[in-house]
Structures are given as C-alpha cells and as structure tokens.
Image: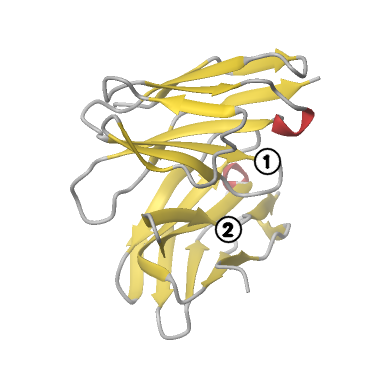
C-alpha cells in the first residue's frame, strides 16, 4: 500500500540552528501539504503545493520558514533559525488532484524538539 | 465562533459500549467531511469520509452528517481498548486561496476494560 514518506522521524536541535524536513508523497498525488501540530491541538496547514507551485502559504512564518517542491514530487520544509516555540509535530500529507473529496493521507510525521 | 468545535474529552466508555463523538462547524465549511484517528505520538489516520446528509457505515464505525444543524458525528460500536485514541474531525473550509482542510482540536477517547 502506497504511503507518504517523511524523514527524519525525530529531530532535536538547539534554538537558532537550522533544521530541514523531507517528504515524499504517494506516487501520482499532485497536491502536497505541510502541517504543524502542537500537542493538544489539531494539525494546522503551513503550506500547500499543487505540483511545484505554492497554492497557499498564508500561515507559513516566512521570516524563518521556507518550503520547496522543485520537481513537483518530493518536498523540503526548512526552519532557520529554530525557536523554542517551533517544537511540534510536522506532518506531510498528499492528495490526488481529481476525485470528489481530495482525501488527504498523512505521513508518519517528524517530531521536532528545540532546546 | 470557531470554524470547527469538538469536545476535548476525555470521553470514557466501557469495552463493548457505543462511543459517540461529535463535531460542529461554521457556515464556511464545504461539502467534504472527514474523521481521523490519531494514536498518541503518531500521525492522523483516515477513518471515514462523508459528503451527504445521513449515515455512512463502515464496519464498527458510522458517520452521521446533519447539514441543517451543522454537525457531524462518529459512532463506534462494540468499542475496544484499541480504539483508545484522539479522534479529529476535519472539513474543507472556503478561503481566499481555495479550500483548506481545517481540523478540530480532537476528542480523546478512552475505552476501559
């Protein structure tokens, strides 16, 4: 069964350092999403890609966060510099472009701890 | 008013009972509704989607949608300890940039032996 892949699964870093997360969506899924989930809350969308184009990055803190999907397949989310408040689970999801509901399927996530 | 509201729980039910989880939503929600299950420390896993008023059944799970009252619910029959998790409802909400999947804060379910 096809799955969304993410790495690393866990990341511990010190504040002011740079971190990067990688995501490989389900094959054939043109839409890719990055979410941040703080403990006790639901996932919140950071950025959405359609192929290699950004569709929505309105909630992405652009002073420190960046995301790219250069070839329209896998994607990287970067934080520089990391802050204590960035400690959270970072989730990647993908969905097919066509179809009724654009059901999103999540990867295993990257748990980030900023010290 | 929040766009999506869920009771955070925890909701405790005995093994074998029916667990009922509810979610209300605002006017800007579109026609696609989802329930995800999330075990502690894991990522959300899709359980069910529902698009039309009424009930949709899948095994021990039944999703119910009432657009007039703006709520969606999830019933879990014959609850098992393995059902203990946080259940997230999610809806596509119309925004300036298109449709965005918006999650509730989740309801924690505990199935007790």
Residue A19 location, quadrant: top right
Q: Nearer the viewer, residue A63 or B48?
A: A63
Res. B58 visible in picture: no
Residue B20: x %, y % from top left: 57, 67
Residue B51 location, quadrant: bottom left
Q: Is residue A85 left or right of residue B63?
A: right
How many angstroms separate mark 2 from mark 1 (CA)? 13 Å
Q: Any mark on residue B104, and which?
A: 2
Residue at position x 37%, y 43% in the image: A104
Circle 2: element type: loop
Residues at discs 2 and 1 both on one chain:
no
User: Badge 2 local density, few (<14 within 10 Å), some, or many (20+)?
Assistant: many
Residue B15 location, quadrant: bottom right
Q: Which residue is denoted by mark 1 in the rendering? A: A38
Q: Is residue A101 left or right of residue B25?
A: left
Residue at position x 70%, y 14% in the image: A17
């Amino acid at each position: 069964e096809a799955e969304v892949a993410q790495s690393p699964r866990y990341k511990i870093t010190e504040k002011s350092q740079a971190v990067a997360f990688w995501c490989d969506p389900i094959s054939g899924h043109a839409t890719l999403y990055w979410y941040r989930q703080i403990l006790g809350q639901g996932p919140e969308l950071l950025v959405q890609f359609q192929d290699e184009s950004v569709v929505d990055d309105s909630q992405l803190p652009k002073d420190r966060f960046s995301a790219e999907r250069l070839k329209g397949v896998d994607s990287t989310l970067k934080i520089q510099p990391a802050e204590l408040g960035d400690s959270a689970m970072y989730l990647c999801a993908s969905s097919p472009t066509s179809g009724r509901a654009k059901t999103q399927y999540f990867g295993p996530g990257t748990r980030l701890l900023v010290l | 008013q929040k766009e999506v509201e869920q009771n955070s729980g925890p909701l405790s039910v005995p093994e074998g009972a029916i667990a009922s989880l509810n979610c209300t939503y605002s006017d800007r929600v579109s026609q696609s509704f989802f329930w995800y299950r999330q075990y502690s420390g894991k990522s959300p896993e899709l359980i069910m989607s529902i698009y039309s008023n009424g009930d949709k059944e899948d095994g021990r799970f039944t999703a119910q949608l009432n657009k007039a009252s703006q709520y969606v619910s999830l019933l879990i029959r014959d609850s098992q300890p393995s059902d203990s998790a946080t259940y997230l409802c999610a809806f596509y909400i119309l925004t300036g940039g298109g449709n965005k999947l918006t999650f509730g804060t989740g309801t924690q379910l505990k199935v007790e032996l």
